[in-house]
Image (cartoon, rainbow, N blue to C red):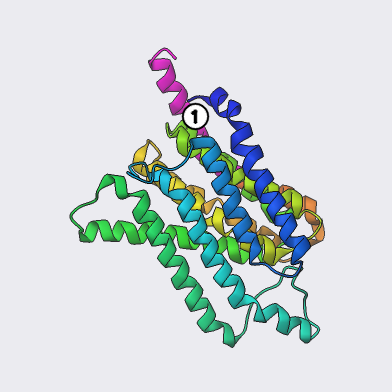
Amino acid sequence: MGLSDLIAALPYVVLIPASVAAALGLLARWLMPRATWPAPAATALGYVAGHVSTLGWPRWSSMDASYDWFPLAAMGVALVAIVESRLSRAAPQAAHAAGGPQQDQPQPVRGSGWLMRDCIVLLLRAGVAAIIIALVARPLKLQPVSARNLVWLAGATFVVVVFWSWLAWALRRTPSPVALPGLLVLLTGGSLTLLWSHVATVAQIQGVLASLTGALLVTNAAAHRAPFVAAAMAVVATLAPAQWISGYLYSDLPPRSVDLLAAAAAPLGIPLLPGVRQFGAWRMAAIVALATAGMILPITLPAYQEYRAANEAYGM
């Protein structure tokens, strides 16, 4: 599958998941304007719609393909994100009662009462991430269970949890027009890297994640609902690194590229630096997007060069 084939698949990769997620997200905001728990459900259903329209229904009987598990994983992550949003509900209400920041605005979540909540959240994230990675690696039939395989599973789970937690932390503290363009650049670059690493199937569903991010950016460009956006992006924040790991396991994607792609989310923290907020939202968004692109290019360009060299070698 080449770039032209990926472009031909754009209606299924982009329009269907974006339309489903945007419609459900806007409906949830209209019916329950203060609630955040419908956000991950809308994103998960949008992903399932995009996955099925792009690759067809998962083969539940065999599950030989690692990507067949991603629709089920999206629903599991959404459930964890809903639990997180219910655990976090007391903080915005308490802040509102005290005259503090509103739920619709970016805000930190602090306080000694949150220690137990944070521990529960991390355990939930680690548990679902470990299950997803184990399912992604299932076709390899890593038997017998060995210390080496367990260490690899722990390391891959750590990458997913750190990426998920960093995005959740950053998105709760920055307006969506600032953070989401950089994440959109990251996912687009990740999709192209997967494509040029000869794993076009996973590249398409990474494109589905990018389309969900774009839909969330468009529908929340003026609302600045940071908690809503952070909850909605839980599905993307978990499936994206899992798909990169799938690309490493079943294609030519080097392991260092997985780490570098995850590290390319670091520019999302630029708006939190002292003195940066004075530039304005859209200027900060451009800075974040350019910084992310600068971190993506050293990963994407070598993949493209190797892809082009391989095609020329085979006369394609």
Q: Give the residue drawn at x 44%, y 72%.
A: 123
Query: Which sits in the foreground, 243 or 189?
Result: 243
- Figure check: 25 above or below 121: above
Residue at point 21%, 58% (across, down): 145
Horizontal placement of 189 versus 176: left or right?
left
Our reading of the magenta stretch's main secondary structure is helix
**In the image, what residue occupies the spot 45% across and 26% down?**
307
- First to last magenta residue range: 293-316
Q: Where is residue 267 in the image (x, y as percent from the top left)?
A: 62, 54
Residue 144 visible: yes
Mark 1 residue type: Tyr
Q: What SS does tag 1 mark?
A: helix
Residue 297 visible in the current orientation: no
Q: How many marks?
A: 1
Label 1 sits on residue: 304
Q: Residue at x 47, y 66 (%)?
A: 125
